[in-house]
């Protein structure tokens, strides 16, 4: 069973990451929309949408938005926000979904690279492309591995919500692995793992080229500043589906 099935549906995930910058995330989406300038009523897909934070923001602009996520627990939360132009479904990103249907697809906040084998990442890339209309646009927001490697923190302790999370990081088999341990309210030790592929820009370019998509732009942070391989905290990529 994939680590993401246990961890993303856990209440401890939200506790550990409760201090994420919501304002910065919201500004990122607004910056993207200003850059992309989608037509009114565009069909949009939020892949690995979690509880629907970004999908709801996109829907506020009156786009027709669909969010998909493999976590049943997350989609159960997201469905409470459904409207006439916002829907959520439990779905594995590796599987096809609404072929040639969407004008735009988004994959936010390092919600890719979860799988152990490259063939699964290739399946996901092909399903992303298949969901888009010809000349549709895909945005992928990923960690910048070269920046992570240059500033690698192997161990830290974080206090959140009354819990002490002990975090150890390592690079293993071309994945960045994070081991998270803590004692729960019953004083039982809990352990979760995060593992994402150490993909570079060249890796993404090759993977999505094989899925018939072309890289047309890159950014290095949520302010959409220029991407720099070492200095940029994020690797934000804009792909365009080739015309059939």
Image (cartoon, rainbow, N blue to C red):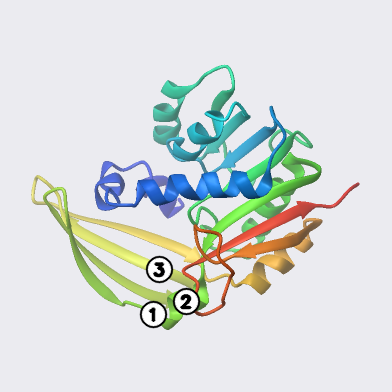
On residue 80, which mark appears? Answer: none
Q: What element carries label 2?
A: helix
At 30% from the left and 48% from the top, the residue drawn is: 13
Disc 1 marks which residue? 151
| For discs 1 and 3, the disc positioned in front in the rendered view | 1
Q: Position of residue 141 (x, y in %)?
A: 55, 57
Q: Are marks 1 and 2 in contact (CB under 8 Å)?
A: yes
Side of 14 where 127 appears, left or right: right
Q: Is 177 drawn above or below residue 78 in the view shown?
A: below
Side of 185 where 89 appears, left or right: right
Disc 2 marks which residue? 147
Q: Is 4 drawn above or below residue 166 in the view shown?
A: above
Q: In which quarter of the image is residue 131?
A: top right
Q: Is 218 drawn above or below residue 183 in the view shown?
A: below
Side of 214 where 144 appears, left or right: left
Q: Do the residues labelled 1 and 3 touch (CB within 8 Å)?
A: no
At 60% from the left and 26% from the top, the residue drawn is: 62
Q: What element carries label 3?
A: strand
At 44% from the left and 75% from the top, the residue drawn is: 148
Disc 3 marks which residue? 177
Q: Is mark 1 on a helix, strand or loop?
A: loop
Q: Residue furthest bottom?
A: 150
User: In the rendered structure, which disc, 1 or 3, sits on the residue that comes first in sequence?
Assistant: 1
């Amino acid at each position: 069973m994939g680590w993401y099935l246990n961890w993303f549906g856990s209440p401890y995930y939200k506790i550990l990451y409760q201090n994420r910058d919501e304002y910065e995330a919201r500004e990122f989406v607004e910056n993207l929309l200003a850059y992309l300038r989608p037509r009114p009523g565009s069909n949009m897909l939020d892949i690995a949408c979690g509880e629907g934070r970004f999908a709801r923001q996109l829907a506020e602009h009156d786009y027709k938005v669909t969010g998909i996520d493999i976590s049943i627990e997350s989609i159960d939360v997201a469905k409470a926000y459904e409207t006439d132009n916002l829907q959520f479904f439990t779905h594995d990103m590796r599987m096809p979904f609404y072929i040639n249907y969407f004008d735009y697809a988004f994959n936010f906040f390092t919600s890719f690279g979860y799988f152990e084998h490259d063939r699964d990442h290739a399946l996901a890339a092909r399903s992303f492309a298949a969901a888009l209309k010809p000349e549709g646009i895909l945005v992928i927001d990923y960690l910048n591995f070269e920046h992570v490697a240059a500033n690698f923190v192997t161990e830290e302790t974080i206090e959140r919500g009354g819990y002490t999370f002990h975090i150890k990081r390592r690079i293993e088999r071309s994945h960045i692995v994070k081991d998270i341990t803590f004692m729960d309210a019953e004083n039982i030790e809990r352990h979760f793992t995060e593992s994402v592929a150490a993909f570079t820009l060249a890796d993404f370019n090759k993977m999505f080229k094989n899925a018939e998509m072309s890289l047309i732009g890159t950014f290095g942070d949520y302010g959409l500043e220029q991407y720099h391989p070492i200095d940029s905290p994020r690797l934000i990529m804009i792909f365009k589906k080739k015309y059939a």
